[in-house]
Image (cartoon, grey):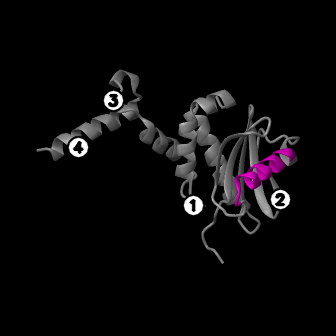
Amino acid sequence: MEFCPTVKNILLLDSEGNRVAVKYYSDDWPTNSAKEAFEKAVFTKTQKTNARAEAEITMFENNIVIYKFAQDLHFFVTGGDDENELIISTVLQGFFDAVGLLLRDNVDKKEALENLDLILLCLDEIVDGGIILETDANVIAGKVAANSMDTGAPLSEQTISQALATAREHLTRSLLSV
């Protein structure tokens, strides 16, 4: 019996069921074709529902799948049938809200593809090896922004938090070199 809740996969699909960003943390789908078949099947089962305002839940192939739609993107988080639905739902909401923050509430396929690096970093901050690390969207987006900022960019082109992080880094370097 596992004491730590786990996630089997996190999927971000477009309105036609094609991959935008996916991460698998389980060996339940050993091949890429098995993963793609699962994605198509989950998409087909959920596409006619209205999961825009709130997340929906379904059982699918002995898994709990919680999903939510925004514009032309479909967000899915899958857990085992013995996992707590509320925890999986919190993971989905954290991912959904963090993507919204990172894309400045312009959550659509075009914007997601242009910022795919941020979304993949977001997935890495939320779950590692199936173990849930963080569900607070503000913390996730902050870590992703800190990891992805360009410290070589002029200060005028950086956000305040990026500028402070750059200043802190320069101060640390100058103190360590003394």
Proximity of marks 2 and 4: CB atoms separated by less than 8 Å: no
Q: Is there any visible trace of residue 105 in the rendered image?
A: no
Closer to the camera: disc 3 or disc 4? 3
Q: Which residue is under mark 3?
A: 152
Q: Which residue is under mark 4?
A: 172
Say if 24 sits above or below 1 in the image.
above
Who comes first in sequence, dot 2 or dot 4? 2
Quarter-of-image position of residue 173: top left
Quarter-of-image position of residue 26: bottom right
Q: Residue flagged by tag 2: what amino acid is it?
A: Met
**Viewer-side residue, 34 vs 103:** 34
Q: Position of residue 12 (x, y in %)?
A: 69, 43
Closer to the camera: disc 1 or disc 4? 1
Instruction: Spot the residue most to the top.
Output: 156
Q: Quadrant of the image for the N terminus?
A: bottom right
Quarter-of-image position of residue 6: bottom right
- Looking at the rendering, the stretch of residues picked out in magenta corresponds to 30-44
Q: Residue flagged by tag 3: what amino acid is it?
A: Gly
Report helix, strand or loop for mark 2. strand
Q: CA distance from mark 2 to mark 4?
A: 51 Å
Residue 38 is a magenta residue = yes
Who comes first in sequence, dot 3 or dot 2? 2
Numbered tag placed on residue 129 in the rendering? 1
- Give the side of residue 98 with respect to residue 49, left or right: left
Q: CA distance from mark 1 to mark 4?
A: 32 Å
Proximity of marks 1 and 4: CB atoms separated by less than 8 Å: no
Q: Which residue is under mark 2?
A: 59
Q: Residue flagged by tag 1: what amino acid is it?
A: Gly
Q: Residue flagged by tag 4: what amino acid is it?
A: Thr
Say if 18 sits above or below 65 in the image.
above
